[in-house]
Image (cartoon, helix red, strand yellow):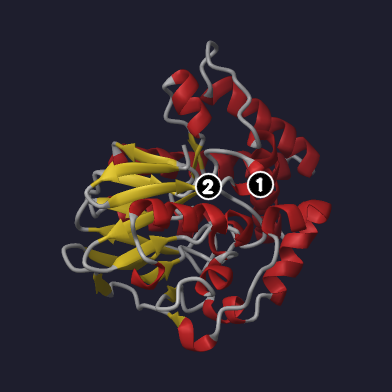
Amino acid sequence: MSLVDLGQGTYQIDVHDMGVAERTAVYVLRGERTALIESGPTPGASYVLDGLEALGVRREEVHYIIVTHIHLDHAGGSGYLLRHLPNARVYVHAKGARHLNDPSRLIAGAREIYGADFERFFGEVVPVPADRLYSPVDGETLDLGGRVLTFYNTPGHAPHCLSVYDSATRGVFPGDAAGIRFYALVKECGLEFILPSAVPPQFEPEAAVASAQRLRGLEPAYVYFTHFGRAAGAVELLDRYCDLVRQMTAMAKNIIEAGGDWPAFRHRYREWITAELLPPDCRPDPQNLGFDLDLNSMGLYQYVKSRKE
């Protein structure tokens, strides 16, 4: 089901990112005004618009599209959605705003990674007009009427990451600042399996840990993962995220100091995930897990290698 009622005026829409169900979510937050957390990529916009219609939300009632960062799976559809949401503005970190107004560098970077799949995954990336962009400062609040959102700068996954704390649910919407939650493993094994998202080229593990610890200090009840779904036990999950970032970084340092290259680290990283993080009786292969592991290993390797050099 693409639309899920999570209670307290909060709804989850599955945008079928990369053609895969339960990979990427857009959240609808309703107060006196309505906000979206994330836009998702452009091919998923129809799911968002259909979800709003099913909720009885008129398009002119959506006032905010809040993107946690500017990677195209999170923000790529924002310009397209603005064509259909006449009163909406896009809230984005100040370091990312110009790239939504002129997405040429985002497009070029994504094409390098996704190659021939770019069009299928991301479609048309429509520029966001400058007068419909807004960048909240760290600690700024937004009152939707009945619920207050607070914005926090949370770099690490990328320097343009913005997390949102919601007073109504005591939940955080961290984008990728708390990692990726593989929902297939939640369903099939009851395992809350998360991994830090260390995609190249801007991952910084020290900043990632500091950001997660900052979110932990809010003592949230829930994490609303863009990838994917709401998880309880937020404090424990944020602690686990920090531990995993430290372990992954140490592993990359050890491989590089021993003269290993990226293929060697990629092999060790995959081996570690399956042997040490997944229990023996829970070894399904969720779609795109291998793809995510390769991106993570590449980002970690590049970071540690650049520091060493």
* Of 299 and 102, the residue lying toward us: 102
Identify which residue is drawn at 52% across, 25% down.
277
Identify which residue is drawn at 78% across, 51% down.
117
Q: Tell me if 31 is positioned left or right of 93 in this view.
A: left
In this rendering, the answer to whether 99 lies above or below 48 is below
Q: Position of residue 82 (x, y in %)?
A: 51, 73
Q: Residue furthest right?
A: 116
Q: Position of residue 222 (x, y in %)?
A: 29, 44
Pointer 1 residue: 18
- Residue 34 visible in rendering: yes
* Of 221 and 14, the residue lying toward us: 14
Q: Position of residue 295 (x, y in %)?
A: 68, 47
In this rendering, the answer to whether 285 lies above or below 118 is above
Identify which residue is drawn at 19% across, 62% down.
147
Please, what is the three-letter code of the amino acid marked with disc 2? Thr
Identify which residue is drawn at 51% across, 35% down.
182
Pointer 2 residue: 24
